[in-house]
Amino acid sequence: MRHVLPALSASTLLLFAGCAAVQDGRPGRPPVQGSMAQAPSVAGVAQESFGKAGWGRQGEFALGGQRVRYERGAERLSLFDPLPAGVRAPLSFSAGDAAVSCEGWTPEQSANGRLTDSKPWVLSCKWGTGPAAMLQIGEGQVRRGKLSREGAYRRGELTVGLRSAHLLDGSPQPQTAAVGYEMLHQGTVVGSLDLSGPVPRLRRPDPATPLGRAVTEAALALALVWEPA
């Protein structure tokens, strides 16, 4: 019997480990150990974590030493859920001397929306300092049965494309809701916002450059209309 007990203990530990793995991978929630699949152009860029687990209606946090304060029009917001009834101003925030106000609305449902049983809404944001900066993102393309969100951030002559990402690293199966967003400049991914964990993780160019600033400002808006797991 002395030789049987250790074997039973090992089996029990394996059983517990298996149950934990199943719980972490339950449908509708990315695995705890998962992360957004990265484009080669940003795979080697250091990532920065920011924010907190659960945004709520208002709060503040720091990103790269810069204080960000925000207020949201609803307790929960997501570009992949319907816009809460009666909410026209889903988000406002300030980062440094930049104040941002955003509007949201739900357009008439398109053929893509009916195909995926989705009701995408449009997020439109305006930065109130310096050269006019605008961000707009809404319904994108159906890819592998999933309806993306796509748009752009524009400041002067600089345009950064935005598109939702749906693949976790090492997984061939896309998620219905975004696991993050990619930011593109002249067709190349130059930044990414990983939303697969409890807090956002950002890869960006030098924030002191115009391109880095654009990626940062777009990432803040997108992160604040996402609900942490």
Image: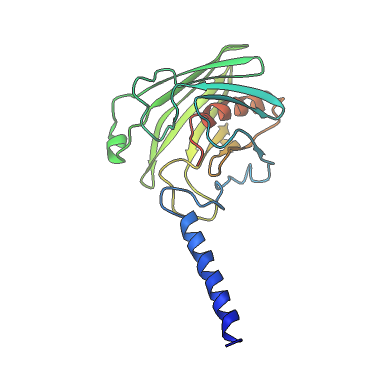
Q: Position of residue 101 (x, y in %)?
A: 51, 16
In the rendered image, the quadrant that contains the N terminus is: bottom right
Q: Is residue 76 above or below residue 157?
A: below
Horizontal and vertical percent position of residue 17: 54, 65
Q: Residue at x 47, y 44 (%)?
A: 166
Horizontal side, residue 76 vs residue 204: left or right: left
- Whole-percent x, y for residue 175 in the image: 43, 47
Position in image of residue 222 (x %, y %)? 52, 30
Q: What residue is drawn where x is 52% and y is 66%?
A: 16
Say which of 221 and 188 sits in front. 221
Closer to the camera, 49 or 179? Answer: 49
11 on left or right of 89:
right
Q: Residue furthest front?
A: 1
Q: Is residue 35 left or right of residue 206?
A: left
Number of numbered tags placed on the structure image = 0
Using the rendered view, name the quadrant where residue 88 is placed.
top left
Residue at left offset 56%, top offset 37%: 53
Q: How is the image coloured?
A: rainbow
